[in-house]
Image: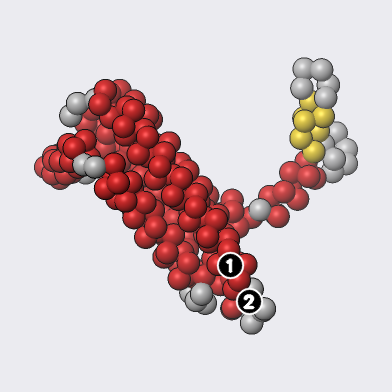
Amino acid sequence: MKGTNVFLRGNWGRKIIDKASLVSAIKNHFIMILLALCFLGGMVFGSILARSIDQAILSKIDFLFVSNFQERAVQPVFSVLTASFSSSFLFLFACFLCGLSVWGIFMVPVILFFRGIGLGMTSGYLYALYGFHGVIFNFLVILPGAFLCCLALLLAAKESMHLSRNITNSGGLNTKAYFLRFGKALMICFLAAVLDLLTTVCFAGLFSF
């Protein structure tokens, strides 16, 4: 098949993917793709780490998880919401500070990788200790809010990378736009905390650890 415009066709011969457009899209969103891969790489590493750590350490992690699970079940709604939002805010604030530094372009991927390790270890630990029961708990209670939070973190990380690169290249700095975009990411983090609260209230009572 000749030419750069190579198409994948569906059952009715419709054009689905233009190869040239796909390459262009990858170039235009390279930073976001790179950051997403850093996060996913951290998740994979965290999952493997959780499955391979010593049983004694796993037992201590389990004690902390069960204690936290039981504490959240009796805490006021506002306390659960605040705790969930605070954990997301710390990573978002770290990205914000990195964007104001020339080192941000190197540190932001590390932050995402570290966040991925945390989520990956949680998922791997729940599967290692509780099997299918843990997977369902992870899917219903933890992942919905975590997914929305990570989406906000990816958007914030992208803005940090852009501003840090502009500082490095002595380019113009639009700090107003930077603050506004981080404000939007912060709102998404708050919605993620609300979603985490809702999944905890709706589904956590179905599980016992």
Work out whether 57 lies above or below 111.
above
Q: What kind of residue is marked 2?
A: Leu
Question: Residue 173's mark?
Answer: 2
| Residue sticking out furthest to the right | 3
Q: Is residue 122 visible?
A: yes
Mark 1 neighbour density, 10 Å: few (under 14) some (14–19) many (20 or more) = some
Mark 2 neighbour density, 10 Å: few (under 14) some (14–19) many (20 or more) = some
What x and y, as percent, mark residue 70? 17, 36
Q: Which residue is mark 1?
A: 178
Work out whether 132 lies above or below 84.
above
What x and y, as percent, mark residue 74? 18, 37
**Which type of secondary structure does the marked residue at label 1 adopt?**
helix
What x and y, as percent, mark residue 144? 43, 36
Q: What kind of residue is marked 1?
A: Tyr
Label 1 to label 2: alpha-carbon separation: 9 Å
Work out whether 95 lies above or below 18.
below
- Residue contact at pointers 1 and 2, CB within 8 angstroms: yes
Of the image marks 1 and 2, the number of the one nearer the N terminus: 2
